[in-house]
């Protein structure tokens, strides 16, 4: 399995899509730093973890996953892999593990950019250790959040156009739900909102946002929102469980598709 993962990683690393996608981690922090004159590490990391993650990383993960799953069909090499033999289930798991590494690296790179920009602008590196852990955890959770969308892409099979449409529709809808009180301010339990990945991640992240220099509007929102924060074990438990279910379904679908 490790050799299979290494092989998939080498294939992805050579692709221009991967290289271009990785560069997008610079976009939101640079735009934010140019737009505002007064910001700190907490503000910059909020951009990295939410805007970079929800608007860029989720659709990029889906598009890259589509490329990983369809490339053997494009180059007609899947039959050769089946002769080694390599089962399609193991191949699917290897591809998803490589995607996990990409998502974690994307989040950590965003953290590194935020640290660098703070250092260049003389901004104090307050709570840098916590922000590092949040960047790592956010990368894992965003990978899990993309799993339902990737499952749908694999189910559609061999359509890049549909994959892109699904990816950006999912990201856009998730971002809208993230700022909707009806999907945020709901108690945890066996209800629909508890199983929505992006709102759950936001309900987990926002509790770590510093309110030291927040205005009256932000403080009021924080106080109203705080009863609905999600503990770390709960958000990881829910999203990883959903990801495991999606992976089992995805690998079964991929296994049954024609070579």
Image: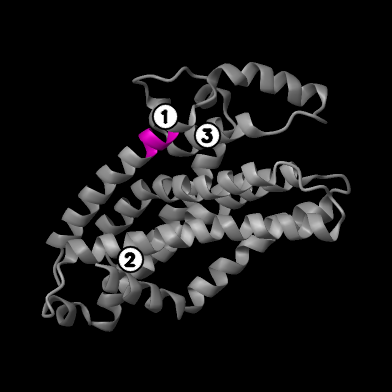
Mark 2 or 1: in front is 1
Which residue position is annotated with label 3?
Answer: 177
Q: Which residue is rendered at x = 22% and y = 82% of the image?
A: 77
- For the question of whether residue 67 can be seen, the reply is yes
Q: Is residue 132 placed above or below 69 in the rendered structure?
A: above
Question: Which one is in front in this view, the residue at disc 3 or the one at disc 2?
Answer: 3
Relative to 75, does residue 5 appear above or below in the rendering?
A: above
Q: Label 2, on which residue? A: 159
Which residue lies at the image location 35% right of the left edge and 69% below the top edge?
68
Q: Quadrant of residue 225?
A: top right
Secondary-structure class at tag 1: helix
Q: Earlier in the sequence, mark 3 or mark 2?
A: 2
Distance between the alpha carbons at the discs numbered 3 and 2 = 27 Å
On-image quarter of the C terminus = bottom left
Label 3 or label 1, whichever lies nearer to me, is 1
Is residue 181 one of those drawn in magenta?
no
Residue at disc 3, secondary structure: helix
Picture colour scheme:
one colour
In the image, which residues are magenta? Answer: 234-239
Q: Is residue 237 magenta?
A: yes
Residue 60, given in percent of the width and then of the height, sits at: 49, 60
Q: Nearer the viewer, residue 84 or 125?
A: 125
Residue 258: x, y in percent? 13, 68
Q: Quickly name the residue at label 1.
A: 234
Answer with the quarter of the image where residue 228 lies.
top right
Mark positioned earlier in the residue sequence (2 or 1): 2
Q: Main secondary structure of the magenta part?
A: helix
Where, by quadrant of the figure, is residue 176 drawn? top right
Q: Is residue 170 visible?
A: no
């Amino acid at each position: 399995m490790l050799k299979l993962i290494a092989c998939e990683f080498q294939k992805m690393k050579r692709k221009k899509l991967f290289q271009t996608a990785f560069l997008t981690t610079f976009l939101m922090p640079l735009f934010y730093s140019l737009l505002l004159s007064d910001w700190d590490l907490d503000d910059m990391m909020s951009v990295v973890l939410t805007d970079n993650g929800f608007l860029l990383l989720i659709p990029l993960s889906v598009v890259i996953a589509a490329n990983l799953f369809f490339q053997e069909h494009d180059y007609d090499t899947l039959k050769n892999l089946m002769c080694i033999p390599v089962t399609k289930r193991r191949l699917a798991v290897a591809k998803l593990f490589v995607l996990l590494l990409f998502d974690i690296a994307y989040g950590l790179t965003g953290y590194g950019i935020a640290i660098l920009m703070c250092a260049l602008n003389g901004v104090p590196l307050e709570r840098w250790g916590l922000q590092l852990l949040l960047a790592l955890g956010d990368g894992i959770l965003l990978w899990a959040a993309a799993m339902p969308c990737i499952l749908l892409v694999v189910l559609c099979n061999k359509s890049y156009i549909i994959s892109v449409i699904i990816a950006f529709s999912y990201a856009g809808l998730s971002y809208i739900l993230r700022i909707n009180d009806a999907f945020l301010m709901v108690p945890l339990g066996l209800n629909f909102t508890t199983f929505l990945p992006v709102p759950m991640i936001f309900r987990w992240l926002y509790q770590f946002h510093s309110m030291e220099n927040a205005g009256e509007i932000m403080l009021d929102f924080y106080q109203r929102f705080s009863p609905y924060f999600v503990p770390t074990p709960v958000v990881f438990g829910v999203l990883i469980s959903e990801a495991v279910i999606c992976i089992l379904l995805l690998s079964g679908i991929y296994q049954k598709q024609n070579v």
